[in-house]
Image (tube, helix red, strand yellow):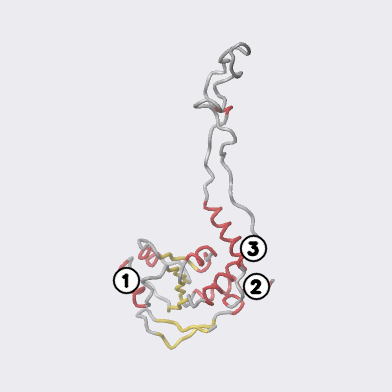
């Protein structure tokens, strides 16, 4: 697939980029994308929830009444879950929600997500750019020039740039990532990808080597 590279003023430059069909042109595998997104969201969970069980309640262990003769049920402790303030039965405990996913599966999921965006013409290539200082207005102008103001945007940079990140972090529909940090969730969560020219080689190096081993 060949795409034109846009300038920051919105016009098309004379340069084009050829996207690797092994990364941007495969048939998307929906199941592996589901697994990768599921793992990503599971890893975001803190898992610090906790409820006190019967053995952790600070109540007296004195028996409440006689074993027999009261006419009611037998009770041995106020810690019982049937009393207000008692322990909770099978309550949540701290745990790790993460699970293992093979590297090849994760790589296939990212290639599938990128191919899905390419198939739907939701990828815009832009020349390498930078900001001299953090300025949200500059980023808004760039987005308007490329006619992406109404899009939920994922900006993929070739290398880390603090000024670009700081210029966009106040915008609710924009996320900036480095090419090496691309993940399936961010790709699918965006309605359009804005990829810097220098990021293409990074993506090819990251996902192309894995595809050759398959």
Distance from disc 2 to disc 1, alpha carbons, whole Å, reads 38 Å
Q: Is residue 17 above or below residue 110?
A: below
Disc 1 secondary structure class: helix
Outermost residue, right direction? 214
Q: Nearer the viewer, residue 30 or 205?
A: 30
Q: Which label was assigned to residue 211?
A: 2
Distance from disc 3 to disc 2, alpha carbons, whole Å, reads 11 Å
Looking at the rendering, in which quadrant would you find the N terminus?
A: bottom right
Q: Nearer the viewer, residue 80 or 179?
A: 80
Disc 2 secondary structure class: helix
Q: Nearer the viewer, residue 44 or 34?
A: 34
Dot 1 and dot 3 residues touching (CB under 8 Å): no
Estimate the x, y position of residue 10 in percent, counting from the top left: 37, 81
Q: Which residue is mark 1?
A: 138
Q: Is residue 5 above or below residue 71?
A: below
Q: Residue at x 54, y 45 (%)?
A: 47
Q: Residue at x 59, y 14 (%)?
A: 71
Looking at the rendering, in which quadrant would you find the C terminus?
A: bottom right
Dot 2 and dot 1 residues touching (CB under 8 Å): no
Q: Is 173 on the left or on the right of 31, as rendered?
A: left
Mark 2 burial class by Cα count in 10 Å: few <14, some 14-19, many 20+: some
Disc 3 secondary structure class: helix
Mark 3 burial class by Cα count in 10 Å: few <14, some 14-19, many 20+: few
Mark 1 burial class by Cα count in 10 Å: few <14, some 14-19, many 20+: some
**Number of marks in the image?**
3
Q: Quadrant of residue 138?
A: bottom left
Q: Quadrant of residue 128?
A: bottom left
Outermost residue, left direction? 137
């Amino acid at each position: 697939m060949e795409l034109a590279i846009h300038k920051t003023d919105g016009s098309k430059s004379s340069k084009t980029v050829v996207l690797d069909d092994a990364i941007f042109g495969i048939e998307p595998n929906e199941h592996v994308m589901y697994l990768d997104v599921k793992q990503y969201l599971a890893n975001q969970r803190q898992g610090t929830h906790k409820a006190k069980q019967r053995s952790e309640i600070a109540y007296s262990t004195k028996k409440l009444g006689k074993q027999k003769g009261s006419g009611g049920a037998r009770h041995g402790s106020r810690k019982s879950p049937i009393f207000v303030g008692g322990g909770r039965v099978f309550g949540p405990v701290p745990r790790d929600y993460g699970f293992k996913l093979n590297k090849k599966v994760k790589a296939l999921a990212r290639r599938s997500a990128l191919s899905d965006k390419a198939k739907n013409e939701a990828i815009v290539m832009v020349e390498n750019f930078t900001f001299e200082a953090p300025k949200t207005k500059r980023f808004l102008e760039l987005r308007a020039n490329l006619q992406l103001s109404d899009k939920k945007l994922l900006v993929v940079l070739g290398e880390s740039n603090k000024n670009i990140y700081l210029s966009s972090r106040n915008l609710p529909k924009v996320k900036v990532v480095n090419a090496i940090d691309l993940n399936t969730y961010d790709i699918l969560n965006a309605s359009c990808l804005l990829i810097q020219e220098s990021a293409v080689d990074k993506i090819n190096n990251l996902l192309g080597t894995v595809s050759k081993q398959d």
